[in-house]
Image (cartoon, rainbow, N blue to C red):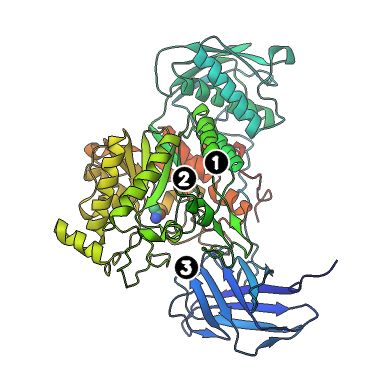
Amino acid sequence: MVADWYEGVSLSSEWQPATEAAGASYRLFVTNRGPAPLAGFRIGFSGPARVSDNAALVGGSVVARLSNYCEIAPAAGFVLAPGATWAIEIKALDYPIRHWTDGAVTGFLILADGSTGALRTEPTRLAGSDAVRRKGTMHFPVPEHPPVPVSVIPWPRHVAVSGRRTVPPGLAIGGTSPLAEAAADAFALLTARLFPGEGIVRPAHQGGYRVDLVSGTGGGEAYAIDFAPDHATVTAATEAGFLYGLVTLGQILRGARLHLRQFSFPTAGRIEDAPRMGWRGCHLDVARRFYGRDEVEHFLAILAWNKLNVLHWHLSDDEAWRVEIDAYPQLTGRAAWSGHGLTLPPLLGAGPERSGGYYTRQDVRAVVALAARFGIDVVPEIDMPGHCYALLAALPALRDPGENGLYHSIQSFPNNCLNPGVETVYGAVETILGEMLELFPSRYFHVGADEVPEDAWQTSPVARALGERLGVSGAAALQAHFLRRLQAFLTANGRVTGAWEEASHGGGIDRDNCYLVGWRSAATSRELAAAGYSVVVAPGEAYYLDMANSADWHECGAAWAGFSSPEATYRFEPTAGWSAVEEQHLRGVQACIWSEPMTDRAVFDRLVFPRLSAIAETGWSRDRDYARFAALAGLMPNLYGQREPAGGH
Ligand code: ACM
């Protein structure tokens, strides 16, 4: 086999935190272990961390940069001899690196002729430390004596069961109403997906234990289970209620089967259950990293197993556009992909090869339909007017040609906001939303609204003219005007507008027909409620599942909102200190999965699980108990099957 020309060249990096004597420094090392000298090249690399605008470099110079993507060239005439290392020191990043997933994730060589070669790239080291990098879901062993006899997460409202029978090999589910049959089918699909080969649903002639689904009063997502020695009866009034009753039974069965001594399968008694909150959501960012339809569908099954009922699907951001729009094929043609020389460079650890992806209309329909079977509402988000770098790269005609200055988002994307003063923006957005409303039957449509830079549109003549006409100034007021027009469009189409909390700024959107997600802190959710907005609580410090599990370097994840152990996430009380009036504005809770640090799938499994279940239990259960949760959490599924070794690291 002929070796690629770059074979043997590697990239490693090291972070030296600031000391009393010196500022922080970030060092990159390109080592040539190949047989030939390397000349006329530069490197491109990216990971979550960003090289600052004003970074001082030793050993090279920045020749291109977009957000976290950076190209660095050595001095003219530099030759990297076999066996030699090119060291580059960078004196300033936009924020200090705190975890091993922060630094350069991928790097590649770029030759003068434009050809590229991916480098073997080591995760960033902390200077002076060789701690093991943690990934894979944290180990939660089932204790010898769990505090409860049955394994259920989220814990039901009322559990009074007794007895212990030989664990049935599976459940033979029967029901006569169409609702019951639909729920039984959905449960069979769910368990086959999550636990293939376990045979949780099986007919009576294969030893299935009889489960009767019986229509009863109650409503919404409520259900009851009555146990007898040879069968159980699930009573519910809706398909979701039946499904949740079956999920509870399935969890009891799995717990008892996998941990025979610790848990039992009851023979008598009753479980009565209904959720504390109506909105039990999970946000998934598929823009920063693309997840294929099958991954999303598998994730839906995990949400259902946690009795979560909303998928907030973050389909666009600065880095990418992920949904097919017939009217604008450029969106997925250009903005769903990144790579060297493409409209979007390899951000957040993507490689030089073209990578990315999008969901076709058929994919979306399939995801939405499966979600419905699992009791999950799919709320799409198109993030506007900020976080639109990819959209604007695909549709540059939506910019104000007269805008002649630069502003940057917090993630360092230049001029990344749809301009409220450009009238054609509204037509384009309504066309896009119009197509999406056909694909998404949800009552809700989320329009973003987060993180518009304060200095956005300052040099845009049409934005200034709009401000003068409205008698307002500043980005927040212009954004509020933009969002109110979107809200009016959505309301006219029978939808409720969702947005991040900044939609309350600058005069805000109409409180009727909207909900806002409080994300910047626990306090802001309460402020939104106090201001009369319907609130979904999702504070970064507790519910952002991209934040690391602890402050340790060897944990993966981000740190800008802090860190949160599973216990801290579990113990977070969304309405602590709220008045009774404020509590009336609580719609629910939501986990937020942002994908910047999800450099590999084992990182996803560590960051998301079991904290997702901790939030699910907060949304569902009135009675919370961390010791009980910790005893049961190890039974919950993760997405990729990546778990840390027993005993941890
Ligand atoms: C957000 O985290 N920017 C909503």
Q: Nearer the viewer, mark 3 or mark 1?
A: 3
Q: Residue 468: horizontal and vertical position, in percent?
A: 16, 61
Mark 1 = which residue?
630
Residue placed furthest toward the bottom: 77
Figure quadrant of the N terminus:
bottom right
Q: Where is residue 333 shown, x and y percent of the image? A: 53, 53
Question: Of label 3 and label 2, which has the lower sequence position?
Answer: 3
Marks 2 and 1 sit apart, C-alpha to C-alpha, by 44 Å
Determine crowd level at label 1: few under 14, some 14-19, many 20+ residues with C-alpha closer than 10 A: many
Q: Amino acid at mark 2?
A: Ile
Q: Quadrant of the C terminus?
A: bottom right
Q: Secondary structure at mark 3?
A: loop
First-in-chain label (3 vs 1): 3
State the image quarter where residue 537 is shown: top left
Side of 522 relative to 93 (left or right): left
Which marked residue is nearer to the observer: mark 3 or mark 2? 2
Residue 102 position in % (x across, y down): 54, 65
How far apart are the alpha carbons under marks 3 and 1? 39 Å
608 vs 108: above or below:
above
